Image (spheres, helix red, strand yellow):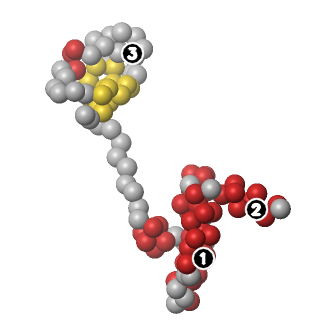
Amino acid sequence: MPIYEFKCTSCGYVMEVLVQGYVVPGELTCERCGSGEVKKVMSSGHYHQSQTDRLGSYGNQSRKSDSFYSDTRNIGLHAEQMLRKAGVKPTEEFKTKLERLRTNPASVVKDSDE
């Protein structure tokens, strides 16, 4: 069941609608103002990068957005890139610690305090 976005032409509100079968936009009403004047709009798309792509596009000199630092998948990219450049294959211990750091960064900080 797809989720479509509809925009109210009266107030500009954009709402998401779970669609079961075909829905005529005229049958919908705006959640905010109650108007029946809604039209289907194109939703934004998303692209998921593989770890290899993330590593390949990583540059430690480039300026990063705030969202880069809030995404835990980016933890350790610099270390991985440096290993790759040096031709060193990461050990299983390194991979395990890095995965632990990515999935639960707080646990690593907590362990270092002890």
Please report whichever mark, 2 or 3, sits nearer to the chain's N-terminal start: 3
Query: Please, which residue is most extreme toward the top here?
Result: 34
Q: What residue did someone put label 3 on?
A: 31
Nearest to viewer (mark 2 / mark 3): 2
* Side (left or right) of 55 relative to 26: right
Q: Residue at x 41, y 65 (%)?
A: 50
Query: Please, which residue is most extreme toward the bottom here?
Result: 87
The answer to whether marks 1 and 2 mark residues whose Cβ atoms lie closer than 8 Å is no
Disc 1 is placed on an element classified as: helix
Amino acid carrying label 2: it is Asp
* Side (left or right) of 84 relative to 32: right
Disc ID at residue 94:
1
Q: Position of residue 28 (x, y in %)?
A: 27, 16
Q: Position of residue 79 (x, y in %)?
A: 61, 76
Q: What residue did someone put label 2 on?
A: 111
Disc ID at residue 42:
none
Mark 2, residues whose alpha carbon is within 10 Å: few (<14), some, or many (≥20)? few
Mark 1, residues whose alpha carbon is within 10 Å: few (<14), some, or many (≥20)? few
Q: Residue at x 18, y 21 (%)?
A: 24
